[in-house]
Amino acid sequence: MGYYGGKGMPFYGYFTIPGAEPANGGVAKTSFLVHKTLGLFFEYLVPMHIGAAVFHAWKGQKIFRRICPI
């Protein structure tokens, strides 16, 4: 990723954290692969979870009352 690739990391547009002095391409590639895999996993998991909650609410189950009993 940016830090281990030697490019640095922008911090919310305020400043940039400098990258690792000796760029480590192996760690950069591995961290990018992990980041991409987890992103895809959550890209599918979150909508499925929301869809399941809506489906159970549509069936008349009181799941939102159990989540937030107020």
Image: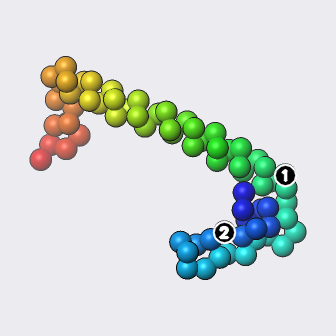
Task: Say which element carries label 1.
Answer: helix
Residue 14 relative to residue 27: left or right: left
Mark closest to the chain's N terminus, 2 or 1: 2
Marks 2 and 1: CB-CB under 8 Å?
no
Q: Amino acid at mark 2?
A: Met
Give the vertical position of 67 relative to 57 (above or below). Answer: below
Q: Quadrant of residue 19?
A: bottom right
What residue is rendered at 27% in x and 24% in y?
Answer: 55
Q: Of residues 31 and 7, which is closer to you in this image?
A: 7
| Residue 42 on image: x %, y % | 51, 39
Residue at x-position 71% and y-position 49%: 32
Rounded to the nearest angstrom, the CA distance separating label 2 from label 1 is 18 Å
Q: How many marks?
A: 2
Q: Which residue is mark 2?
A: 9
Question: The N terminus is located in which quarter?
Answer: bottom right
Question: Who's the residue at 57% across and 38% down the image?
Answer: 40
Question: Which residue in the structure is indicated by mark 1?
Answer: 26
Q: Residue furthest front?
A: 13
Q: Residue furthest left?
A: 70
Q: Is residue 53 left or right of residue 25?
A: left
Per the image, label 2 sits on a secondary structure element best described as strand
The outermost residue toward the top is: 59
Please determine whether, in this image, residue 59 is positioned above or below residue 41. Answer: above
| Residue for point 16% across, 29% down | 62
Residue 9 location (% of width, % of height): 66, 68
Give coordinates of residue 31: x percent, y percent.
72, 50
Task: Nearest to the eye among marks 2 and 1: give it.
Answer: 2
**Which amino acid, mark 1?**
Gly
Q: Is residue 3 above or below residue 25?
A: below
Q: Which mark is residue 58?
A: none
